[in-house]
Amino acid sequence: MLTKILRVVKNFYFATGVGLLTWMLFFDANDIISQIRNSLKLGDLETDLVYYDEKIKEVEIQRQSILGNPRLQEKYARENYLMKKPNEDVYVLVNEKNEPIEK
């Protein structure tokens, strides 16, 4: 039994296969640790993708409502970019949640 195992271990193809497998698992640029790390990073990026898709939809809805109304365009520019006319001060009133109070 022991002689069979030694004969298999001494076999050139077996030793080459074990060496290649060791190289691929631990020393190659695409080793198993890198694959796991990349898989976890991919999951994080897919989560970010969902978040940013939702934000894009919100901005598109806001953009459509603002572009259709010149009064809202002026209000948006004044509140978010603090644009003002000469000799004028802009005050943005906010509630406890730091959200602008609508008139």
Image (cartoon, helix red, strand yellow):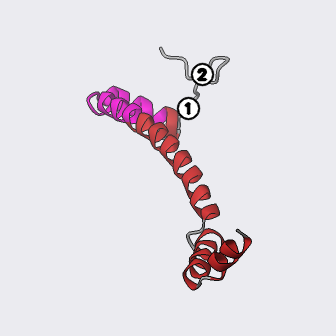
Q: Nearer the viewer, residue 4 or 96?
A: 4
**The quadrant where residue 34 appears:** bottom right
Q: Residues within 10 Å of mark 1 (few under 14, many from 20)?
A: few
Spot the residue most to the top.
Answer: 103
User: Is residue 59 found inside the magenta-colored segment of the image?
Assistant: yes
Q: Position of residue 50 (x, y in %)?
A: 45, 38
**The quadrant where residue 17 appears:** bottom right
Q: Which residue is mark 1?
A: 90
Spot the residue most to the left.
Answer: 68
Residue 23 appears left or right of 74: right
**Segment tinted magenta in the rendering:** 57-78
Q: Position of residue 98 (x, y in %)?
A: 64, 24
Q: Nearer the viewer, residue 88 or 11?
A: 11
Could you tell me which residue is drawn at 70 percent across and 68 percent down?
1
Q: Which residue is mark 2?
A: 93
Q: Give the vertical position of 36 relative to 2 (above or below).
A: above
**The quadrant where residue 3 appears:** bottom right
Q: Give the vertical position of 11 relative to 50 (above or below).
A: below
Spot the residue most to the bottom.
Answer: 12
Q: Position of residue 40 (x, y in %)?
A: 59, 50
Q: Secondary structure at mark 2?
A: loop
Could you tell me which residue is drawn at 73 percent across and 71 percent down?
2
Q: Nearer the viewer, residue 27 or 34?
A: 27
Spot the residue most to the right.
Answer: 2
Could you tell me which residue is drawn at 53 percent across and 34 percent down?
88
